[in-house]
Image (cartoon, rainbow, N blue to C red):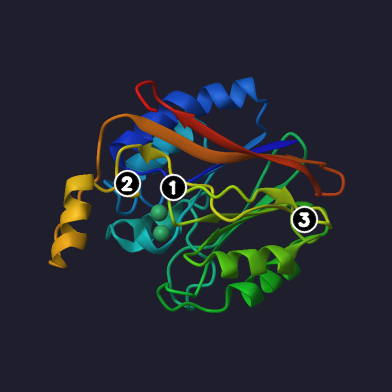
Amino acid sequence: MRILFVGDVNGKTGRRMAAARLPLLRRERGVDLCVVNGENAAGGFGITGEMADELFRAGADVITSGNHIWNRKETADLLLHEPRLLRPSNYPPGAPGKGMFVAPTPHGPAAVINLMGRVFMPPVECPFREADRLLGELPPEVRIVLVDIHAEATSEKVALGWHLDGRVSAVLGTHTHVQTADERVLPKGTAYLSDAGMTGPADSVIGIKTSIAVRKFLTGVPVRLEAADGPAQLNGALIEVEPSSGRATSIERIIFREAGQG
Ligand SMILES: [Fe+2]
Ligand SMILES: [Fe+2]
């Protein structure tokens, strides 16, 4: 079976790109499950119900997120009513929503798990132990498991990949918005990529308008960050999984840029 994972959809440009490319990718690459990180869908900060619906209509089966999931006040309520929209599972008890969803696919049930790192990130519970706990909860018939680890530090993401090797189908990083080139299938059958990248404005500072971001670095003065526009890119990964065992057999990075890009 084939799983398409799409890195952080950023602002209007990212949503436009997702709407245009997801249906094509699904059809052309025979995708059975599509997971999209949507934490930056609303102008770079959070996601609304309408935007989640937009991504579901475009072909997402499950939407994962990260630290920006709390940017919009209404999202807390949305998390309670839309089980296909996840927030990192290792937020402390009492946080609304859930971090795992089991999606039906033509090859049987597939669990999607959303976790967040702790290095240079808001304080949360241990993602390693949370992963162990969630895997212990899963019924044995769920053999296909995909993990979105939303984290800053590659060391933490690499360590989680090894920790889960052979126990999940894929561990895919998000949050930095810059795709890494370390995709591989680990020895026990887990597909791994430190960061899937960003789906959004290609000419930007990780999604933010370049002039604003550069000015912030030059002056150190806090500014109101604004999502960039212009030509779009789509970043993600395509993972092939053997449904009977849940083991990954291949992982391929997806990079698509609109015309006009070098
Ligand atoms: Fe992000
Ligand atoms: Fe993030």
Label 1 environment density (alpha carbons within 10 Å; few <14, some 14–19, many ≥20): many
Q: Which disc is residue 186 wearing?
A: 3
Instruction: Tell me the quarter of the picture where residue 258 sits.
Output: top left
User: At 71% across and 49% down in the image, what residue appears?
Assistant: 184
| Left-right relation of 111 to 220 | right
Q: What is the C-alpha distance between the residues marked 1 and 3? A: 24 Å
Q: Secondary structure at mark 3?
A: loop
Q: Which quadrant of the structure image shows residue 227?
A: top left
Q: Is mark 1 within 8 Å of ligand 1?
A: yes
Q: Is residue 179 above or below residue 29?
A: below
Mark 3 is surrounded, within 10 Å at the Cα level, by few (under 14), some (14 to 19) or many (20 or more) other residues, namely some
Q: Amino acid at mark 3?
A: Leu
Q: Nearer the viewer, residue 215 or 92?
A: 215
**Residue 163 vs residue 27, the one in the foreground:** 163
Q: Is residue 151 above or below residue 24?
A: below
**Residue identifier under label 2:** 207
Ligand 2 rendered quadrant = bottom left
Sequence-first tag of 1 and 3: 1
- Mark linked to residue 245: none
Asked if 48 appears above or below 16 in the picture, the reply is: below
Mark 1 or mark 2, which is nearer the start of the sequence? 1
Residue at disc 1, secondary structure: loop
Task: Specify which label sits upstream in the sequence, 3 or 2.
Answer: 3
Residue designated by label 1: 8
Mark 2 residue's CB less than 8 Å from ligand 1: yes
Residue located 83% across and 59% down the image: 140
